[in-house]
Amino acid sequence: MTKITPQPGIMDIALYQGGQSHVAGVEHVIKLSSNENPFGPSPKAIEAVRDSAATLHRYPSTDHASLRNAVGARHGLDPARIICGVGSDEVLQFIAQAYAGPGDEVVYTEHGFSMYPIIARMAGATPVMVAERERKVDVDAILAAVTAQTRIVFVTNPGNPTSTMISQQELERLAQGLPDSCLMVIDGAYAEFVDGFDGGASLVDAHENVIMTRTFSKVYGLGGMRVGWGYAHQSIIDVLNRVRQPFNLSLTALAAAEAAVNDVEFLTFCQAENARLRTWLSDELAKIDVPSDPSFTNFILARFTDQAEAEACDEYLKSQGLIVRRVAGYNLPNALRITVGDEEACRRVVAAITAFKEGVA
């Protein structure tokens, strides 16, 4: 046996489980397990990817200036205070790597993104889980859990896999209640699905210890490219850039993301279709006693009588070529997370769950 041992905390990491993509024995499946955009990426992003093929022998920019400028223009933010990463996951990792370590605590909520405790342990810090209330972030519970050792608080808003969100006032109350020595990270992977929500940008401007992260993997349909970004006070961005590898994003990924963020027409189409189909899907499932909380994302969290019924329904859906996501690992054993697909996919989901509930399955 090797005498080489990993750093403390590494072997405590449970491997992340992504959404299932295949079903044995079923040829044609609709994947609704990873909250991907059913309409794909912007045609302009696809064109940018094709155009980039001729320059693949060149290194990408190290400062991501063109993409940062495009993001800044789109959201009215200072590009100098933006950092880009391989998905927003990498930006979250930069934060933990730079600001947490052995003896420190990282707070996250019980239904929050499962990468938070993984990222904390990667840095050698101790993850601290806080209960939510009715599948929503509980600001009072978070504040009660903060100690002198707390360095980071992760808040997913809107939530994944819950689809719920807390108000701007609650986010402000949390920011004001945290000590200056603690960073508040607002993970806004689904912020683009919420009308009038800035993802936390105004809180970043008001508080030096608040960071906002976003991704191109959801509404922009670039999950395969892995591009994300963060927005924070200049002093924090300067720190994070010191742990970022200079060529962390490929030339192709940068080109695709810039084209996507500039294609406002396609973005608006995706947002409108998601809102329409999300409402229809949740309303139709509610009619057959499968409730869900009002969703602010591109998925719904469908709740069943108990874990057995949720798992049985999942198995039936898979037999019909429909892959959704079990979320028992997020302490939601009686629920299934269902991505809002295109109209055909949504209708197939409703028909299949109706058949299951009626005992036809």
Image (spheres, grey):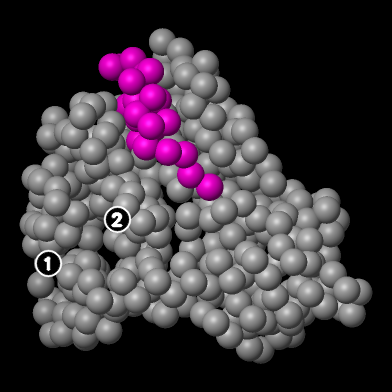
Among the two numbered marks 1 and 2 on one chain, the one whose residue lies closer to the N terminus: 1
Q: Which residues are magenta?
A: 164-185
Which of the pair 334/50 is nearer the observer? 334
- Amino acid type of the residue that numbered disc 1 sits on in the rendered structure: Tyr
Give residue 237's quadrant in the image.
top left
Q: Nearer the viewer, mark 1 or mark 2?
A: 2
**Residue neighbourhood size for the residue with mark 1, other residues' Cα within 10 Å, grouped as few (<14), some (14–19), many (≥20):** few
| Placement of 110 over or under 314, stated as above or below | above
Residue at 53%, 55% in the rendered image? 295
Residue at x 59% of width, y 71% of height:
280
Is any atom of residue 104 visible in this view? no
Q: Position of residue 163 (x, y in %)?
A: 54, 52
- Which quadrant holds the C terminus? bottom right
Residue 130 visible (yes or no): yes
Residue bearing the label numbered 1: 59
Residue holding disc 2: 228
Q: Secondary structure beneath disc 1?
A: loop
State which quadrant residue 94 falls in: top left
Task: Indicate the quadrant containing the N terminus: top left, top right, bottom left or bottom right.
Answer: top right
Residue at image x 54%, y 62%?
299
Q: Is residue 52 left or right of residue 125?
A: left
